[in-house]
Image (tube, rainbow, N blue to C red):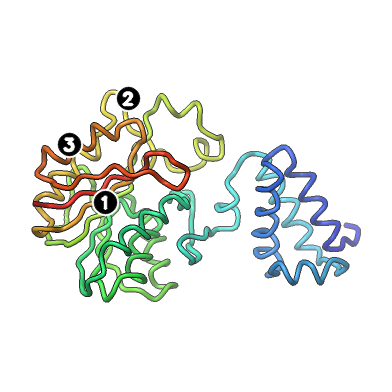
Amino acid sequence: MHIMILKQAIEQLKSGLAGVAEPQEVQAMIRVICEDVFNYDQVDVALRQESELPEFAQERIADIISRLQRHEPLQYIVGSARFHGHKFKVTPATLIPRPETAQLVDMIVDENTAPDLRVLDMGTGSGCIAISLARALKFPQVDALDISRDALAVARENAQALKVKVRFFESDMLAPQPDGRYDIIVSNPPYICWSERESMDRNVKDYEPGQALFVPDNDPLLFYKAIAPYAARSLEHGGRLYLEINQRFGNEIKRLLEDNGFDEVRIIEDSFGKVRFAAAVMR
C-alpha cells in the first residue's frame, strides 16, 4: 500500500462520497470520520494535512467509503451518534437519534423545572431521551422500557458511560409495565406507515430496525392507542405526556388524547415547520 497523507485521504473521501450525500453533508461526515479514525478534531485536521497515515487508517477509510456507498449509516459504521450534546453508542439494534428528537428533550426540560420528577421513557432504544433527561432535569428518577433486549444492553452502556442512573425494563409498549406513578411520560414510538417506506432513504429503511420504525397502514395509531390509556392510569394529576408523532395524524392523536382524559393537548411543529410532537396534561 503506497504512503498516503491526510490531505489525500480527505480528497479520497470527498470523491468517494460525492454520489452518496450532498456536499455540505459530506463535509460533516468527513469531520466524524476524522474523529473516529484519527481522533482528530477540525483544528488537528487543518494542521496535519501533510502527515502520513498508518496502513490501518488507509484500510479503515477504504472500508468506510465502501460501506457508505452501500448506504450504511455512518453512525452504525463508527458506532456512535451525537445527541443533545452527548455521544451515544448506537448499533443496528437501536434507532439513530435524530436532532428533531432533541427538540422534544428541550421542550420537556423547559416546561418541567421542579426537582425530583418521576419520568418514564417508553421505547427507549439507545436510551438517548431517558439519559438526556436524567442529565438535564433536576434530580429526576428516570425509568425506561423497550421490547428489545439488544437495545436495552446498548442503553445501559450509554447510561453508564454518561454517568446517570436510569432503571431499564424489558417491556412491550403494547402491554406496558412497569406499574408506577409518574410526573412525565415520553415516547417516540414506531409511527411510520409501511406504505411510506418506499419513499424513505435507503440508509434508513435498509439498515435501521424496522420494529422501531414501522406500523401497519390499517392501524397507524397502534402504539398511541396503548400509550394513551397507560399514561392516563400512570400519570399523577397534572402530569405531562410528550410524544413524537407522524405529521399526518396530528388531529387524530389530539382526539385520542382528549378521549383518554387529557387536557391542554398541543400539536407542535419542529424547527423545520413539520408537525412532529404532541403534548398533553393529565386532568
Q: Where on the picture, by quarter, is residue 20?
A: top right
Residue wearing tag 2: 217
Q: Earlier in the sequence, mark 1 or mark 2?
A: 2
Task: Mark 2 and mark 3 in contact? Answer it, CB < 8 Å.
Answer: no
Q: What residue type is labelled 1?
A: Tyr
Q: Residues within 10 Å of mark 3 (few under 14, many from 20)?
A: some
Label 3, secondary structure: give it. Answer: helix
Q: What residue type is labelled 2?
A: Asp
Residue wearing tag 3: 256
* Residue 122 on image: x %, y %: 27, 52
Q: Is residue 84 left or right of residue 118?
A: right
Q: How crowded is mark 1: few (under 14 residues within 10 Å), some or many (20 or more)?
A: many
Q: In this view, does 201 lie to the left or right of 45?
A: left
Q: Nearer the viewer, residue 234 or 147?
A: 234
Can the viewer see residue 75 in this picture? yes
Label 1, secondary structure: give it. Answer: strand
Q: How many angstroms separate mark 1 from mark 2 (CA)?
A: 23 Å
Q: Which of marks 2 and 3 is nearer the N terminus?
A: 2
Q: Which of marks 1 and 3 is nearer the N terminus?
A: 1
Residue wearing tag 1: 242
Name the residue rendered at 46%, 50% in the picture: 98
* Residue 93 on image: x %, y %: 43, 50
Relative vertical location of residue 109 with respect to residue 124 in this rendering, above or below? below
* Residue 34 on image: x %, y %: 70, 62
